[in-house]
Amino acid sequence: MPTTILSPAKRVFGTRAELRFACQNVLEKNSKETFTIPCEGLYPFQWLWDSAFIAVGWAHIDHNRARAEFQSLFDAQWSNGFMAHIIYHDDDRGKSYFPGSAFQGAARNPYSPTHVVTSGITQPPNLGAMLEILFDKELSEQVKLSPLNTPSVPDPHFYKKAIRHIFRFHEYLYRDRDPHNEGLTYIRHNWEAGTDNCTQFDAIWNTFDPINYDVQRRDTQHVNPKQRPTKKDYNYYLTLIEISRSVDFDEREMYEILPFLVQDPLFNSLLVASGESLARMARHFGMNVIAEQSEKWAMKTRNAMNEKLLDPLTGVYGYFDLRNNRLVGGMSSSNMTPLFAGIPSQKSAERLRETLESLHFAGRNNEYWLCATNAVTDPQFDRTRYWRGPVWININWLIWKGCLRYGFDDLARRIKRDTINLVLRYGVYEYFDPLKSAADNPEAHGFGGNNFSWTAALILDMLAENQ
Ligand code: DGY
């Protein structure tokens, strides 16, 4: 593999130390004391999986602040265990963000909280796995501080409550999102995937006609529309919200009428990882019922993913479209995230590694940074548009950790180097052009929002790790 040489003149940050400092600054600027917004202007509220990733960054700066990030999510949990993808703190009913709380209309659901307004859809359940990173850090630092080197316990009051909140969220997912009791939970909106406009969802958009909305989007006022989902895409997304709103986000009714019900590999992988993390933390505190149930669920989901989502032809995990009873394949970086949760066998994992190193992701001459969100050989690959091509730091971070888990040390090093190089080159952006030569253009810049919180948080984590 040819080594990529960076021309220093084209870097936004000269050194890793400068980058570290910038990342800390991003978190501090985006902090609203008890929660962190993903990005000034573009995403002005609190997002669920963003906050859990962001807490990993805070764990390197201030443990109390990291805990507060989780606590603000738990404070908005619905009484049925559901956790919403947006918490509209200081709600302005849609003035600063579209769709705002008024369009979402989730407050009419009887389980929703009364002290704060949220959306009625969720996001990938990364909370347990991210909380364990903070927990392990607190534990190891306390061990270092303890004069007798006897392990003490990180604040049991906070952690026991946190474990119960996350357990109730998982309980909701297995109860209300697994209609066939297979161990595979479904998402009922593409925003629940986190990978909003990934190419796999095109197959589902082809199955129904959306309403044509004439709305004022805010995202395209902040970001070049070429980097965001199209108007037609938004018509589908808003139609799904409108259908859900028509039944006040009642789970059973939504299951009956929504055209979008998908068993998503990234979502279920994070559920497995979080379930296992929860089990380990619960055991630590003697919460054995939670530990055992979490282990059982994680095992069931792991087996179901290998039986139902793993496509034997490509060796890649696919998306199961429950409404139309079919596996939607394709190759994207989110299909590789089962590595993070230790889901594939060593043999299947080797196949994923080979795919990531092949021309599908690296290009014929290693001309792409790893890991584009869509295979660069896919006719739908689009270097600039949101989840249809660009590199995202959270997905790279998950795959990097997954490679370490399977002993793919060379690939892990390469992904880490590419990830850090991108941010050194372009700045703390939301997503990045995967084509290496694009960075030679002096006008080139990162994509989406700048000073993006989870990029900052996960880069801080990568910089702190030796591996
Ligand atoms: C949302 O509103 O959650 C979308 O993911 C932002 O693009």
Image (spheres, rainbow, N blue to C red):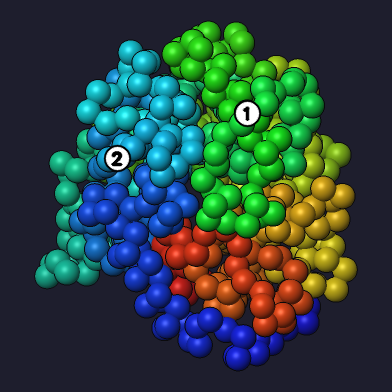
Q: Residue at x 55, y 41 (%)?
A: 217
Classed neighbour count for the residue bearing mark 2: other residues with Cα under 10 Å, few (<14), some (14–19), many (≥20): some
What mark, if any, has residue 213 been given in the picture?
Answer: 1
> Which residue is at the front of the view, 166 or 294?
166
Q: Which quarter of the figure has residue 147? A: bottom left
Three-letter residue code for mark 1 = Tyr
What mark, if any, has residue 232 been given in the picture?
Answer: none
Residue 348: x and y in percent read 73, 46
Q: Which quarter of the figure has residue 64? A: bottom left
User: Is the residue 254 above or below the residue 444 in the image?
Assistant: above
Q: Residue at x 44, y 42 (%)?
A: 97
Three-letter residue code for mark 2 = His
Between the C-alphas of marks 1 and 2, the distance is 26 Å
Can you identify the residue that label 2 sits on? 89
Residue 299: x and y in percent read 53, 31
Q: Who comes first in sequence, dot 1 or dot 2?
A: 2
